[in-house]
Amino acid sequence: MTSLYLSPSLRLIETGHRHEPLMQRAGSAAAAWASELVRRCNRPILVLAGPGNNGGDAFEAARLLRELFFDVQVCFAGDPAKLPNDARAAHQRFIDTGGVTIDDIPTQYGWSLIIDGLFGIGLTRAPEGIYAKWITATNTQAARDRCPVLALDCPSGLNADTGNCPGVTIRASHTLTFIAAKPGLLTNDGPDHCGDLRVAKLDLLPENELAPDGRQLSLADFSEHLKPRRQNSHKGSYGGIGILGGAHSMVGAAFLAGRAAVKLGAGKVYVGLMEHQPPGFDPVQPELMFRRPQALLQAELSALACGPGMGMSLDAGELLETALGLDLPLVLDADALNLVASEESLQTALASRRTPAILTPHPTEAARLLECTTAEVQADRIAAAYEIVSRYHCHVALKGCGTVVATIGGDWWINRTGNPGMATAGSGDVLTGIVSALLGQGWPAEKAILCGVHLHGAAADRLVANGLGPIGLTASELIDAARQQLNEWVRSTASVAPR
């Protein structure tokens, strides 16, 4: 399920197979999963059929479930004569086999399962009228009956391309999407509305017909760089990392980035603190070496990260301008991004770098970089990430639910690792340290950002799997978990490599 397609691409693929029974295949796949999900066979299944082809999928599923002797109640408020051709044929097959429809959701039943076949990938506005009413009733009755909700292709009300919910939206426990996965199911509000996600390819191989618009980030995207260390190596083999940040009251941010860089394999880590009276060492991580900011920028570094707790002072802006002029791998986060957004000369310096930087904004920082609102960024996270790439000539990880990674080469990924425990102060500083450590060890920038994002989320998932969070998970805990995960990946990759 790594390939991701936007709606226009999926319509092209569907058009190329318009003479094949795709709707019957979709209905068959839906009926098969639905029959697995039914928990109380003494209760009926509610099927909601919409006015388009998604409704046709629902009619096919309902017909097949009736053939399996399930009690099926089908709600349909449209005019059968106005259905698209395939959906109208599906409706007729349902009627011909004895099926009947009702024009509103009954209240007297308890449901064993609700199937959402109202709207598929085509809806980009808020549901209205009877359909909005049905969506609200579905969410209420599913909670009342504690029954699963199976969405066909896309939960109704969710934008399949962006993950936006412009109005009421089905909150599915399971989603069966057809032909290929869609980005809106994986980012923004998508994961909260999709539940368990599966793809039914309907006997198609979309990758053979049309290149994916994007991909789901996976280990395979960077596994060639997961190599065991040579026995004959030393600390200089793994880079010298600089961390520039830590203004007054924000020293902890720089500490977190530095600690992450140390534990993710950097040979040496130097921290340049903006604090006027900085501590002489980090008692938790004494391996960190401290330099004055100006001295840090003159040191021999393999990679530099700017921003964690950096502040917005005039000194910070001047130091960042110097950093942007250095010809070495660079990671910008937090206040470094805010400084760039506020100063045109820094924007020019960033965009004209010979070595593209890596930017890791959260949505509000991205909005500042794009001179728009956070809501506008979230309205289309993929487009926002690419606008930053285009404007600043950099690689970007737009953080959030389903982090979007976009690169100068024109590719984009959505990451599915991670959980709500990461919504805590300092989590982004840890990501900065992880990516910096990989850069320092010689990883190409694109691979470093891919691995860093995937690893960051996998560390959080590891902690939750072990009972630590998501509530109360701290950024500091991510560091050791990320180190353990990275070493496991290296070991597993080495065990299958040819000798």
Image (spheres, rainbow, N blue to C red):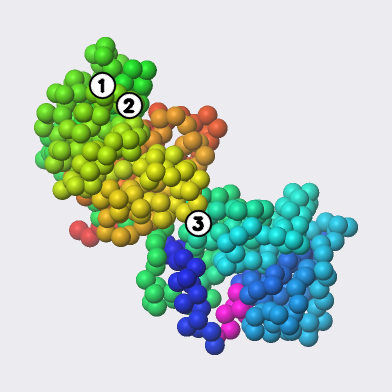
Residue 220 at what x, y percent from top left?
33, 57
Q: Residue furthest front?
A: 344
Residue 5 at what x, y percent from top left?
45, 66
Q: Secondary structure at mark 2?
A: loop
Residue placed under numbered mark 1 in the picture: 273
Query: Is label 1 in contact with label 3 (beta carbons under 8 Å)?
Result: no
Residue 358 at what x, y percent from top left?
28, 44
Looking at the rendered image, the quarter that the C terminus falls into is: bottom left
Give the amino acid at mark 3: Thr
Could you tell me which residue is drawn at 12 percent across and 29 percent down? 299
Residue 15 at what x, y percent from top left?
50, 81
Could you tell me which residue is drawn at 74 percent across and 61 percent down? 129
User: Which range of residues does the magenta coloring cover?
Assistant: 20-27
Report how far apart the C-alphas of labels 3 and 2 lie in the structure. 32 Å
From the viewer's perspective, tell me whether residue 109 is left or right of residue 299.
right
39 vs 398, nearest the viewer: 398
Could you tell me which residue is drawn at 82 percent across and 64 percent down? 104
- Decide whether the magenta segment is chiefly helix, strand or loop: helix
Residue placed under numbered mark 2 in the picture: 312
Q: Earlier in the sequence, mark 1 or mark 2?
A: 1
Report how far apart the C-alphas of labels 1 and 2 lie in the structure. 14 Å
- Does residue 39 show up? no
- Does residue 248 show up? yes
Q: Earlier in the sequence, mark 3 or mark 2?
A: 3
Residue placed under numbered mark 3 in the picture: 162
Query: Label 3: how many residues lie within 10 Å, few (<14), some (14-19) or many (20+)?
Result: many
Nearer the observer: mark 3 or 2; the answer is 2
Location of residue 180 with respect to 280 vertically, above or below: below
Nearer the observer: mark 1 or 2; the answer is 2
